């Protein structure tokens, strides 16, 4: 009896594909390893295991040794722990894992084929020698040696076993594709301590946040902080008074004014130091003479003209300039620490003001970003709000509230990835900050101002700053370079200076 065509037969036949993640179906269908049923079941097992933050059991598809290089690569990178509960990240990683399985299968088959040819050649040589000896004894012609199917199958199995038993290296392409990212996530886990696991697992891989240059910048800034522990001390000075676990005040630091003599180094630009060429001028200095002037000496008639111009100091010469260091002793009033007991003031928010003008490009830029990173970490540890102001020329003010969360770090990354440049508008920026300080949630904040200080401080701004200081706001300054008293000193008290940053990044 004939039966009609069933419209659901094809669907029932391939219903097992529903267990495979949709994004991986094209790759699974074309994989040359095992049957379709085995591939789908194996991929589902790998997917679920990675989503649980572990590797599947060793007997799972694909069988050894195809899975060994992949497992070694994942173990070496420490990547599996970041996959727990991250389906987007697991799907992206599974694509690379399946590609690695394909590569290892091709490599394995190629090595087995090479080994099989060696074994067949050895087998033929052995049988040929035996045939020659037998033919001599029987005094007959030597027969051609042909390997039968059973021998070929036996050699095939032997070749596979020998190749499978050798030492396998971790998959190099998988290490290249994910190694740097895994190292960055591990470092980020150290940067953000307890929340590093959340932030490093690829929570926003679909929107490309993990491809942002700011992620790698976090790691570089953390290394810079390790080189400059003074940065951590500066941020810890914000609300320095500590409390016990019960929240009661303890012995705290009191600052006492003292006067000290310090050596001050002033950088003075002078033509007496030939460090760099700044243009062309007229002078009588032969050592700086332009080649065109020197050519006149070779001409019999122009030689007298050259002597006349030299006597008049009218030769065209390069204008050179350099920096001379002038040292002098100055008397400064500083605050020293002594121990005592006093009521602990309430810790307010942290406001970081970063000068992003062109003069901050280079190592000063990295120092400023490192201070922002430490401020965010401190604010999280002490449960304090944190606000960032990055400013340059008129109207160029970036205002962002920062916290250690996916959204907060997403706002921080663009700042860490940008390169500083532009003019200065301290008045406009300070006006915004002072306005914010009048709001209830930002009163009595700790303000940290990072700048090179090369700007004047208007009287109106100073009055407003003093009023905010009387209301409980503390203004800490970080001056990039020792340029003496600057606008930063007029606004902030105290101002932290660093003279050894050149050793950290080659900046002068």
Image (cartoon, helix red, strand yellow):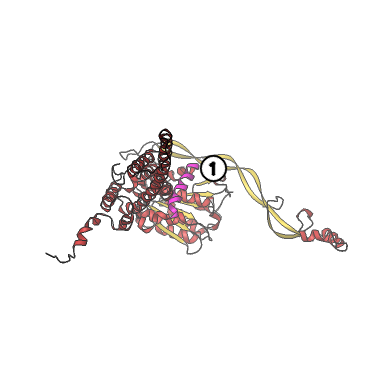
> 323 or 476, which is in the foreground?
323
Where is residue 320? Give x, y as percent.
70, 55
Secondary structure, magenta segment, majority class: helix
Q: Nearer the viewer, residue 218 or 200?
A: 200
Q: Is residue 497 magenta?
A: no
Give the vertical position of 212 relative to 126 (above or below): below
Residue 328: image quadrant is: top right
Determine the residue located farthest toward the left in the rendered image: 1
Residues shaded magenta: 212-229
In the shown orientation, is residue 439 left or right of residue 310? left
Q: Quadrant of the N terminus?
A: bottom left
Q: Seen in the image, is 329 located left or right of residue 79? A: right
271 or 162, which is in the foreground?
162
Q: Nearer the viewer, residue 245 or 53?
A: 53
Whether residue 460 sits left or right of residue 182 in the image: it is: right
Point out residue 104 in the picture as x, y percentages from the top left corner: 38, 47
Disc 1 packing (10 Å; few <14; some 14–19; many ≥20): few
The answer to whether one can see residue 17 in this image is yes
Q: Label 1 belongs to which residue? A: 333
User: Residue extending furthest front?
Assistant: 139
Mark 1 lies on a secondary structure that is strand
What is the total number of numbered labels drawn onto the structure image? 1
User: Seen from this angle, which residue lies furthest bottom?
Assistant: 4
Using residue 218 as the reference point, say whether residue 329 is left or right of it.
right
Is residue 169 in sight in this rendering? no
Residue extending farthest to the top is 137
Q: Position of residue 380 (x, y in %)?
A: 36, 47
Is 213 colored magenta in this rendering? yes
Residue 270, percent across and down? 69, 52
């Amino acid at each position: 009896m004939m039966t009609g065509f069933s419209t659901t037969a094809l669907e029932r036949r391939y219903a097992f594909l529903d267990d495979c993640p949709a994004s991986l179906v094209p790759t699974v269908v074309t994989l040359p390893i095992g049957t379709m049923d085995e591939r789908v079941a194996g991929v589902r097992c790998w997917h679920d295991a990675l989503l649980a933050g572990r590797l599947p059991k060793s007997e799972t598809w694909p069988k050894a040794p195809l899975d060994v290089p992949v497992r070694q690569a994942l173990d070496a990178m420490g990547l599996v722990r970041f996959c727990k509960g991250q389906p987007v990240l697991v799907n992206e990683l599974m694509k690379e894992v399946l590609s690695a399985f394909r590569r290892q299968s091709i490599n394995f088959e190629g090595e087995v084929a090479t080994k099989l040819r060696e074994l067949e050649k050895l087998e033929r040589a052995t049988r040929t020698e035996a045939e020659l000896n037998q033919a001599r004894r029987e005094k007959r012609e030597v027969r051609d040696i042909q390997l039968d199917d059973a021998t070929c199958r036996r050699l095939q199995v032997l070749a596979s076993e020998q190749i499978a038993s050798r030492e396998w290296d971790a998959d190099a392409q998988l290490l290249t594709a994910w190694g740097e990212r895994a190292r960055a996530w591990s470092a980020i886990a150290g940067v953000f301590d307890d929340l590093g696991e959340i932030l490093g697992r690829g929570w926003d891989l679909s929107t490309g946040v993990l491809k942002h240059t700011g992620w790698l910048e976090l790691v570089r800034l953390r290394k810079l902080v390790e080189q400059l522990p003074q940065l951590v001390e500066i941020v810890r000075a914000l609300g320095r008074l500590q409390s016990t676990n019960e929240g009661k005040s303890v012995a705290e630091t009191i600052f006492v004014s003292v006067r000290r003599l310090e050596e001050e180094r002033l950088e003075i630009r002078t033509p007496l130091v030939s460090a760099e060429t700044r243009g062309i001028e007229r002078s009588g200095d032969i050592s700086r003479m332009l080649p065109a002037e020197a050519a006149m000496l070779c001409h019999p008639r122009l030689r007298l003209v050259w002597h006349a111009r030299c006597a008049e100091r009218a030769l065209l010469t390069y204008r050179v300039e350099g920096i001379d260091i002038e040292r002098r002793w100055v008397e400064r009033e500083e605050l020293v620490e002594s121990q005592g007991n006093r009521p602990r003031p309430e810790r307010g928010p942290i406001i970081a003001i970063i000068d992003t003008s062109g003069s901050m490009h280079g190592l000063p830029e990295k120092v400023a970003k490192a201070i922002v990173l430490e401020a965010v970490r401190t604010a999280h540890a002490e449960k304090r709000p944190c606000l960032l102001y990055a400013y340059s020329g008129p109207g160029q003010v970036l205002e962002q509230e920062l916290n250690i969360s996916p959204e907060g770090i997403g706002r921080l990354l663009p700042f860490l990835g940008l390169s500083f440049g532009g003019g200065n508008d301290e008045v406009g920026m300070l006006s915004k900050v002072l306005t914010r300080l009048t709001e209830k949630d930002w009163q009595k904040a700790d303000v940290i101002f990072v700048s090179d200080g090369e700007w004047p401080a208007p009287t109106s701004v100073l009055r407003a700053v003093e009023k905010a200081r009387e209301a409980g706001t503390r203004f800490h300054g970080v001056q990039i370079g020792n340029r003496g008293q600057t606008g930063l000193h007029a606004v902030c008290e105290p101002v932290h200076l660093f003279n050894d940053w050149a050793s950290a990044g080659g900046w002068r």
